Image (tube, helix red, strand yellow):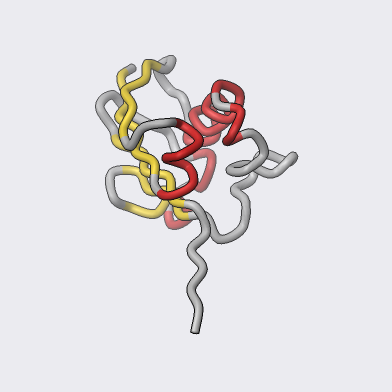
Amino acid sequence: MHLNLRFFATFREAVGQKTLEHEFEDGATVGDVLSTLESEYEGLEGQILTEDGDLQPNLNILKNGREVLHMEGTATVMEDDDTLSVFPPVAGGA
């Protein structure tokens, strides 16, 4: 299945581009996709998923614009031509 992946801020720097098209097996979950990305891009390793396979705190992962935490989390099933957007934690100041 074909997925569109979008990266922001430090994750964009780690991947080296804002958008990426990637092929995954049918039925892949958000967790499968994120695990694959962590293994393919050294700068993402350990930045998105915990050792238990959960999302790191304060990340925003959106499937077609909808936060996956309000769906099935990392168990959310992806479908052909879906877009997965990966946002790092946002910090602000003063």
- Residue plotted at (49% across, 84% down): 94
Specify the quadrant of the image occupied by residue 39.
top right
Judge left or right: residue 50 versus residue 38: right
Judge left or right: residue 44 versus residue 52: left
Furthest residue in direction left, as rendered: 81
- Residue plotted at (49% across, 52% down): 88
- Residue 49: give x, y in percent of width and height: 63, 42
Front one among 46 and 92? 92
Q: Is residue 58 above or below residue 62?
A: below
- Residue 40: give x, y in percent of width and height: 55, 21
Judge left or right: residue 5 versus residue 93: left
In this rendering, the count of numbered labels is 0
Front one among 42 and 82? 42
- Residue 14: give x, y in percent of width and height: 50, 35
Judge left or right: residue 43 versus residue 85: right
- Residue plotted at (45% across, 54% down): 60
Which quadrant: the N terminus? top left
Furthest residue in direction bottom, as rendered: 94
Furthest residue in direction right, as rendered: 51
Front one among 40 and 61? 40
- Residue plotted at (31% across, 33% down): 19
- Residue 87: give x, y in percent of width and height: 44, 51
